Amino acid sequence: MGLLNLLALPLTAPIDSVVWVAEKILDQAEHELYSPERIRQKLAELELALDLGQIDEATYEAAEEVLIDRLREARARMRNR
């Protein structure tokens, strides 16, 4: 089986590289999506937008709910590590 892997290397190496890069991008995207600091920053920005009258109460509440759900998910992910 080792010889077969060696012979297939010119074909599989580029695919393996693309998969590795895709996994790294996914890891980074998930880190940013579920970063508690980033979520709290977005909540603060949302509250500021409400205070400045840039968004209405209904928009604020809907967006806040999404962010709080994401914060809960982030905390659950951190506990499960």
Image (cartoon, helix red, strand yellow):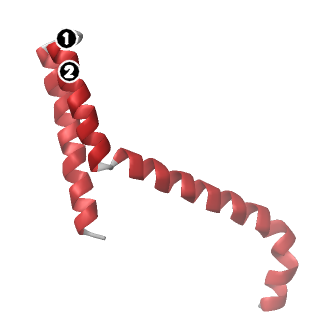
Q: Position of residue 48 (x, y in %)?
A: 20, 21
**Is mark 1 in CB contact (under 8 Å) with mark 2?**
yes
Image quadrant of residue 9? bottom right
| Left or right of 70, for residue 58 | left
Q: Which residue appears at 84% of the width and 89% of the height?
A: 3
Q: Residue at x 22, y 67 (%)?
A: 79
Disc 1 from disc 2: Cα separation: 6 Å
Q: Tag 2: Cα neighbours inside 10 Å, few (<14), some, or many (≥20)?
A: few
Label 1 element class: loop
Measuring 27% from the left and 63% from the top, which residue is drawn there?
A: 78
Give the quadrant of the N terminus. bottom right
- Residue in front for this viewpoint, 74 or 38: 38
**Relative to 50, is 20 on the left or the right?**
right
Could you tell me the amino acid type at mark 1?
Leu
Which residue is most to the top?
A: 53
| Amino acid tagged 2 | Leu
Q: Residues within 10 Å of mark 1 (few under 14, many from 20)?
A: few
Label at residue 52:
1
Say if 49 sits above or below 40 in the image. above
Q: Locate residue 63, reporting x and y percent.
A: 22, 28
Relative to residue 40, is residue 16 depicted above or below? Answer: below
Q: Which residue is mark 2?
A: 48
